[in-house]
Image: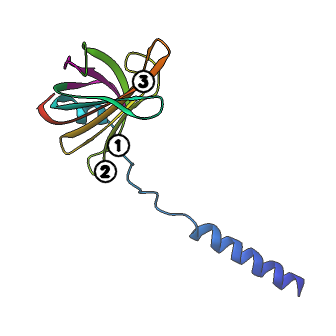
Amino acid sequence: MKKKTYLFLTLIMALMTFSACSDDDDEAVGTQNPEQEVAGTYIGTWNQKLTNSSGELQDENEATGTIELSANRQWVANVTLKQADPVVKEEISDVANCSGNSTSGYILTNNKSANLGNFSAKVTNGEITFIYVTTITEGRKTYTSTNTFTGTLTTAE
């Protein structure tokens, strides 16, 4: 009886070994060069909300502006915010990690405290939504500036 049980278990394991594999023809997730897909000039509107440490709105500004995205290297894009007073006081450039695909959109992020600090953007069908937050200290008062840009691709690279 032990011999039959052993043979039966061996047969089951052999069958499972051959039936457990798949074709592994899964498509790659995302685009291999998303930084090239988002490259271009986007024109739109900046909206800035300045709040105090209690979260109360202190000031709000709006301006027409431009963001330029260009390919740096694979998975990395250069981001340049053109001057748009009073929201963007001077041209600022930084780099962003870039991922995604044309179906669900491309995501650009940077969580290093370099030129822009933490920022994120999503590009879908030639439309961009970009946000970055800065902290401003004046004397003993601290303010948070939330800067949002929505725009449309005007020139692709």
Q: Amino acid at mark 3?
A: Tyr
Chief SS of the magenta region: strand
Identify the element where label 1 is drawn: strand
Asked if residue 70 lies in the magenta stretch, the reply is yes
Numbered label attached to residue 21:
none
Give the vertical position of 156 relative to 8 (above or below). above
Neighbourhood count class around disc 2 (C-alpha, 10 Å): few under 14, some 14–19, many 20 upward: few
Q: Range of the magenta residues?
A: 67-86
Q: What residue do we see at 18% from left, 41% from top?
A: 126
Comes first in the chain, label 1 or label 3: 1
Numbered label attached to residue 100:
1
* Mark 1 and mark 2: Cα distance apart in space: 7 Å
The residue at which mark 2 appears reads as: 104
In this rendered view, identify the residue nearer to me: 128 or 97: 128
Comes first in the chain, label 3 or label 2: 2
Q: Are marks 1 and 2 in contact (CB under 8 Å)?
A: yes
* Mark 3 and mark 2: Cα distance apart in space: 34 Å
Spot occupied by residue 42 in the image (x, y as percentages of width and height): 17, 31
The residue at which mark 3 appears reads as: 143
Q: What residue do we see at 37% from left, 20% from top?
A: 116
* Mark 1 and mark 3: Cα distance apart in space: 33 Å
For marks 1 and 3, give the one nearer the viewer: 3
Q: What residue do we see at 41% from left, 56% from top?
A: 26
Q: For the N terminus, give its image quadrant.
A: bottom right
Spot occupied by residue 6 in the image (x, y as percentages of width and height): 82, 78
Give the vertical position of 82 relative to 52 (above or below). above
Corner quadrant of residue 127:
top left
Spot occupied by residue 71 in the image (x, y as percentages of width and height): 27, 25
The mark tally for this picture is 3
